[in-house]
Amino acid sequence: MARFIFVAGGVMSGVGKGIATASIGKILQSKGYKVTAVKIDPYINVDAGTMNPVEHGEVFVTKDGEECDQDIGNYERFLGIELTDTNYLTTGKVYQTVINKERNLGYNGKCVEVVPHIPEEVIFRIKKAAKENDADFVLIEIGGTVGEYQNSLFLEAARMMKLNHPKEVLFALISYLPVPQIIGEMKTKPTQQAVRWLNMAGIQPDLIVARSVKPLDEPRKKKISIFCNLSAKDVISAPDAKSIYDVPVNFEKDNLGNRILGKFGLRSKRNSDLKDWRSLAEIAKNTKETVKIAMVGKYFESGKFVLMDSYISVIESIKHAAWFFRKKPEIHWISSQKFEKGGASLKALKKYDGVIVPGGFGKRGMEGKIKAIEYCRRNKIPYFGLCLGMQLAVIEFARNVCKIKNASSREFGNEGDDFVIDVMEEQKALLKEKKYGGTMRLGNYSCQVKPKTLAFKAYSSSGFKKEKDGSLMILERHRHRYELNNGYKEKLLKKGLTVSGMNREKDLVEIVELKKHPFFLGVQFHPEFKSRPLSPHPLFKEFVRSCIKRKNKA
């Protein structure tokens, strides 16, 4: 039977449960065990697809098209694996399943109750994830903070699993220890209270990962040990780190991996000190030479604060590629609306080594993005468009090169416009019926990459093998509803746009690029979902390579 480690959070949200969960998994992997991870979100939403990215963060998409919380992306990046819809649960998904089962007499006429039937469905899904992934360890991150009613049923599921499998279940609490500036002392009382909330749910933590601005000292560890009823050796120091990739290394300073294995009566299967991971962490920490990249978007302004979670996979992909070349990525956030309102000059883009326009939805900020893309095209600044960034590059080219004055997308255009970006017929019916959730083109689709193109160069240099006709066949993940309108393709091609990638099954354009430009490339898919710290995505590598060339010429 697999072993199960439940991870809960204490004191406050945003304490780093996802990174801690992924880091524990990485450590267990390094000791020779097969690991998978499950994220439980306490939202009534069936999936993350309809959530506002400014409020919730990035929507990550798995290979089978599940729209998930961004922590699934963290798990994939740290563990180097591909997860599926089995690895993601929400309150809405669980309740929906139980209700549908009841309607179909799946409970044989029993009175269906919140307890035990909801926790039992959660347990069924967790065990299914273990079986489908053939895992030695399943890490289960419970969203929210202990003491909230929203996640109480998931804690109940964890308690029930411990009751039925006492030797196969372990609990970890990721809790925050504040250091009030006016006092200057690290305080353990909030964590003590969090443990009491966990105790009231019938759970005693086996490990406490103590998050704080500084490393824990022995007096604090001892105090937590006494008041929270566990060994001081099971209190793991988790100070703020310069890079998330430092976290597994920091955990191992307190021998976390062997503490976990010991509790299950297991030993390490191989001697590993996370050698490759440590090298990566050192590069991330110590690299000095920078490459400056501008991100032109609209999902990072929240009042007076700049939030990066909406584009977390893009950010990490830039880092992976930059570190490959031993460069430090310097990412700057530019609100596209400022280009529309005169709050920023387009000339400011010249000081960057490259520009990315990431994905997104809706009309707000679109014209500002189009202006930025035009400036990059005219001034030979490396440009990388992701999903919407590709669509807007096509619109810009259609307007300013093909002279299609009213070129637009049906998503935010007006009747009478030339919809060079349009919605597929099958999507029109869904939109008419207001079926938005889980109905876009989602997950893996194939793309045939044309020889003698920039995209071909990028993929072939990363080891992708040629087909018999000399092309490359790749699989990339999608999340979109609108496509390049094939009715305009010939006009675009005649004026110099290159279509370098196609989905042959649906005859859809996947990659466009320009020749006679250092790097101008847009993709309909989301390559950021497949980038890994030790294996950067080929297109991000090629983009960063062109940025470095521009920097060196300056």
Image (spheres, rainbow, N blue to C red):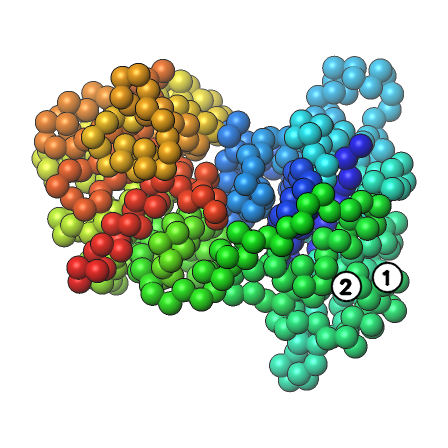
Q: Is residue 285 above or below residue 547?
A: below
Q: Amino acid at mark 2?
A: Val
Provide the secondary structure element on which disc 2 rests: strand
Q: Residue at x 19, y 24 (%)?
A: 489
On the question of residue 242 being in view, the answer is: yes
Rendered image quadrant of residue 105: top right
Q: Which residue is mark 1?
A: 230
Residue found at the far front of this picture: 271
Between the C-alphas of marks 1 and 2, the distance is 8 Å
**Are the residues tagged 1 and 2 within 8 Å (C-beta)?**
yes
Quarter of the picture containing the C terminus is: bottom left
Q: Looking at this view, is 97 or 211 the one in front?
A: 211
Q: Is residue 342 above or below residue 65?
A: below
Q: Residue at x 63, y 67 (%)?
A: 239
Question: How many C-alpha atoms fall within 10 Å of the one at disc 2: few (<14), some, or many (≥20)?
Answer: many
Provide the secondary structure element on which disc 1 rests: loop
On the question of residue 369 being in view, the answer is: no
Q: Is residue 140 above or below residue 147?
A: above
Q: Amino acid at mark 1?
A: Leu
Q: Residue at x 49, y 62 (%)?
A: 282
Q: Residue at x 49, y 55 (%)?
A: 280
Q: Earlier in the sequence, mark 1 or mark 2?
A: 1
* Left or right: residue 86 compared with residue 107: left
Q: Which residue is mark 2?
A: 235
